[in-house]
């Protein structure tokens, strides 16, 4: 049985996620931007919070933790290597470690780049990948602490997962990412179609996440640094993919 996953809008453009295993009743919360909407979602569903998975230390992913824990004591899980910057952890994990939501087993992936020791959580049976500010819908996180080649390597770890994996990223940045993507890959018919879809969703207030990994591979320029059309558009035919990615990320920073 797959996880029942609820998208919870928080702050101005953040998302948190509740992932519920109906078989066992276990429920995990992925990131905690603020408490109020999360507490409201728990009250609405009646789910009992068992675990809190933290992807990285930025305030807009952890600020609601104390208030959520006060109402719903739960096991807090985060990166061992970043424990000095995270709230107190009950379980400290590293790349390759397993995490569970009830009967569902997941794997920890180190996706450093946006921050050092940023982690993602992949639950293969649920076809769910919680990426926060690493891989995002039509984009990727700004590289604050790591290097651009490091971010490229992190994205490649996720790019090889099954295409039917749903990518649950941490922000509603898709409309802005779409505008930029068209400057890098303007003749991609799948991207053009997706931009129309994103525009329609945002006009109706509908979240654009999660997105399918297969869709990201077809339209997200940060996953397409090997594409000959993109390389030609950038004047970088035959260049190393990590160098092409770095150029795309630099252009996005200045967009």
Image (cartoon, helix red, strand yellow):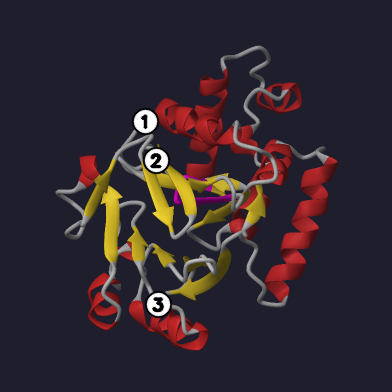
Q: Secondary structure at mark 1?
A: loop
Q: On the image, which quarter does residue 156 sit in?
A: top right
Magenta: predominant secondary structure element?
strand
- Furthest-top residue in this view: 238
Lower position in the chain sequence, tag 3 or tag 2: 3
- Determine the CA span between mark 3 and mark 2: 35 Å
Residue 57 in sight in this render: no
Q: Is residue 142 left or right of 61 when viewed as pictured?
A: right
The dot on residue 48 is 3
Q: Which residues are magenta?
A: 128-135
Q: Is residue 86 left or right of 40 when viewed as pictured?
A: left
Q: Which residue is mark 2?
A: 143
Lower position in the chain sequence, tag 3 or tag 1: 3
Q: How far across and down, in percent of the image, does residue 132 sit?
A: 45, 53
The residue depicted at 48 percent of the width and 82 percent of the height is 41
Q: How far across and down, in percent of the image, does residue 187 sit?
A: 82, 37
């Amino acid at each position: 049985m797959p996880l029942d996953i609820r998208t919870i809008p928080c702050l101005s453009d953040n998302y948190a996620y509740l992932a519920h295993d109906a078989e066992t009743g276990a429920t995990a919360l992925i990131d905690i931007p603020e408490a109020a909407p999360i507490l409201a979602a728990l009250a609405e569903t009646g789910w009992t919070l068992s675990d809190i998975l933290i992807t990285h230390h930025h305030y807009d992913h952890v600020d609601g933790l104390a208030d959520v824990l006060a109402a719903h004591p739960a096991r807090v899980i985060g990166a061992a290597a970043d424990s000095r910057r995270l709230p107190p952890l009950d379980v400290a994990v590293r790349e390759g470690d397993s995490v569970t939501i009830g009967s569902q087993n997941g794997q920890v992936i180190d996706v450093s780049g946006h921050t050092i020791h940023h982690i993602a959580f992949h639950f293969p049976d649920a076809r769910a990948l919680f990426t926060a500010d690493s891989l995002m819908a039509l984009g990727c996180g700004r590289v604050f602490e790591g290097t651009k080649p490091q971010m490229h390597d992190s994205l490649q770890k996720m790019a090889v997962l099954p295409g039917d994996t749903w990518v649950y990223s941490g922000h509603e940045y898709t409309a802005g990412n779409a505008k930029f993507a068209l400057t890098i890959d303007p003749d991609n018919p799948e991207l053009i179609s997706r931009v129309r879809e994103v525009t329609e969703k945002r006009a109706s207030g509908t979240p654009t996440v999660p997105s399918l990994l297969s869709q990201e591979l077809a339209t997200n320029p940060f996953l397409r640094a090997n594409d000959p059309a993109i390389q030609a558009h950038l004047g970088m035919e035959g260049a190393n993919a990590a160098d092409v990615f770095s150029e795309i990320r630099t252009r996005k920073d200045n967009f």
